[in-house]
Amino acid sequence: LDKFHVPLQYTQFYDNIKRIAYEIAADAYADGVRLLELRINPLIHRRAGLTTRQVIHATRKGLSQVGAEHADFRAGIIVIAMRSHGGNMARILLREVIGEKEEYHAGVGVVGFDIAGPERPFPPVLFKDAYALGRKMGLKATVHAGESEGPERVWEALDNLGPQRIGHGTSAGRDPALMRRLARDGVYVEVCLSSNVQTGAVAGLHDHPLPRFLDAGVKVALCTDNPTVSATTIAREYELAMAAFGFSEADVKRLAEMSRRGTFLAGGPDGEQAAKWMSA
């Protein structure tokens, strides 16, 4: 994760952010992705004077360019607040991006809210008011939880923040009661196989709880986390799942469809638009 400081020297400028967003989306499209959610913490890209809205605007423009080139491609932005910045900064960030919501822009906009960063000193309850504000704004919610900490952090996120999805959530696989709660409430777990091995969230690929999640009825979206940092693609993540857990082609198709239904993009996971994008 120390790699993250390297690109930050380039992501402080509007044109660079626009180009990077475009290239991320173009690479994803080439890999077979048709629904893309891109997460961004705007505050870490403001060191050269950009505002939060300018950072999001540049990101929207880059993503929209790929949408203009490919009619079957759809993208949305999830805004991340860093835990270490605290709950008040999370609320300020949300207020700054309200004008960048998807509904106010043709094509691409902000669709969701997330918190990320070190779990240990910053429990989910600190962001209860921020998530309440996000709900008032009409944003969907996901929470990085249970990656570096135990299942208690996932419980706290569910009880205090009311997310539709949990990022990583690997430790939830150790708690049968928690998996029943996730399944009962229809909360998705965003599974990132390569990243979870690299960061030590799981000891090895075969130790990953992905099969346990599925066996318990927990909804799963297979994700890349950060493709550049983890040197992976979504196609490779599906290949890893097949190799490690014996998933068949039919299993992979079901997992891809489940992942599609968990997106935060316009039209809803079961809407006509989503079905159209999938079939295009």
Image (spheres, rainbow, N blue to C red):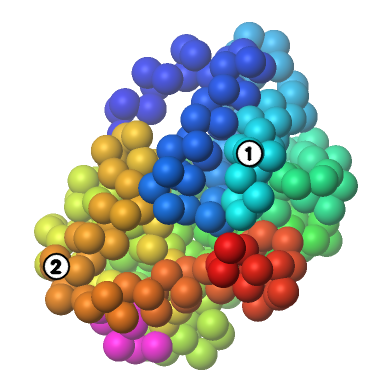
Q: Quadrant of the C terminus?
A: bottom right
Instruction: Please tell me which residue is depicted at 30% across the width and 88% down the height of the picture.
Output: 215
Compared with 105, 217 (above or below) is below
Q: Quadrant of residue 41?
A: top right
Image side of residue 200 versus residue 141, left or right: left
The quadrant in which residue 208 appears is bottom left
Decide: is 228 above or below 33.
Answer: above
Q: Report helix, strand or loop for mark 2.
A: helix
**Residue 70 in sight in this render:** yes
Question: In the image, residue 186 lies at what x, y percent?
Answer: 54, 82
**Residue drawn where x is 71% and y is 75% of the image:** 271
Does 4 sit above or below residue 28? above
Tell me which amino acid carries mark 2: Ala
Q: What SS does tag 1 mark?
A: helix
Q: What stretch of residues is rendered in magenta?
A: 211-217
Toward the viewer: 35 or 134?
35
Residue 269 to residue 13: above or below:
below
| Residue labelled with disc 2 | 244
Determine crowd level at label 1: few under 14, some 14-19, many 20+ residues with C-alpha closer than 10 A: few
Residue at (63%, 15%) from the top-left corner? 15
Tag shown at residue 58? none
In the image: residue 101, left or right of residue 122:
right
Residue topped by disc 1: 69
Q: In this orientation, does residue 153 appear?
A: no
Give the CA separation, mark 1 to mark 2: 36 Å
